[in-house]
Image: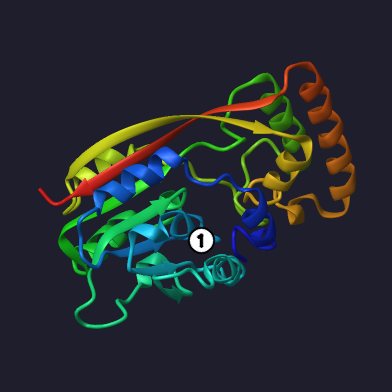
Amino acid sequence: MSEFADTAPYYATYRPGIPEAAVRLLSQTVAGKQHPVLLDLGSGTGQVPAALHEAFAEIDVVERDPGMLAEADKALAGLPDTTIRLHNKPAEQFVPPHADWAADMVTVCRAFHWMDQPAVLSLLDGCTAKDAAVVVMGDGSLWTARSAWTDALRSLIQEYTGSERRAGKDKTYAAHDRPYREILAESPFADVEEHTIDVERPWTPQTVIGYLYSTSFASRPLFGDRLQEFEERAHTLLTEHADADGLIEHARFDVLIARRP
């Protein structure tokens, strides 16, 4: 079973998109190219292609979860002046659509930790332009956020799912301790620049609960027949915090842009 089984509609509706500052940065990276090609790996519901499509002539979207890819298809349908191709497979199994295809930019957003990173980077060495940029980006989650309301919410989730962070119904989350910068520096794309974007996100009880159902650590199947009870308690907890101090998340969105030396 996928770590994200039954989450796709919630993911499409409630997951925060990438910050406008990141959109500008990445669009500028390919500015001036005549026919830029984007490869988005672990695309989820297509948030990155939807945000960057104006900067690219062709976009290849790779996502292993069929439900997620169906949501991406809906989100990207009818975009003007951009050729969109969807690939329902893991990043490690991507095959270029034709022999002379080469990506000018590869993006991996909030998904690199799910991948066989050395295998993906080796694959990309064979299907990217010489001056291509490999972009690994993302932020934390409401599980890793540290504030009074997120700490209380995490404790409530743990009452139902256990103390360890879950990664779908049958697994626990395996943390990746090595910085992505180090992993990239050992790859063919060893020239790495780092950008940090501070983000302040306002939430409501409804959007938080919808977001939780989009995650691998608090998706609806994890709660079984106690789902309604959890949702009622979560809504009460979040409403109390919203009335007291507001539900504000202070996040850091990291963007690593790696190129061949």
The percent coordinates of residue 139 (x first, y second) are 47, 38
Residue 75 against residue 139 in the figure, above or below:
below
Displayed quadrant of residue 65:
bottom right
Q: Residue furthest top?
A: 244
Q: Residue at x 78, y 22 (%)?
A: 241
Q: Residue at x 61, y 59 (%)?
A: 4
The percent coordinates of residue 62 (x first, y second) are 43, 68
Could you tell me how many numbered marks the image carries?
A: 1
Residue 194 against residue 46 in the figure, above or below:
above
Q: Residue at x 32, y 42 (%)?
A: 25
Question: In which quadrant of the rendered image does the N terminus lie?
Answer: bottom right
Q: Is residue 207 left or right of residue 127?
A: right
Badge 1 density bin: few <14, some 14–19, many ≥20, Cα 10 Å:
many
Q: Residue furthest bottom?
A: 98
Displayed quadrant of residue 34:
bottom left
Residue 145 shows in the view: yes
Q: Residue furthest left?
A: 261
Mark 1: which secondary structure?
A: loop
Residue tagged 1? 46
Q: Residue at x 69, y 32 (%)?
A: 154
Residue type at mark 1 is Gly
Residue 159 shows in the view: no
Q: Nearer the viewer, residue 37 or 117?
A: 37
The percent coordinates of residue 214 (x first, y second) are 66, 52
Residue 238 against residue 229 in the figure, above or below:
above
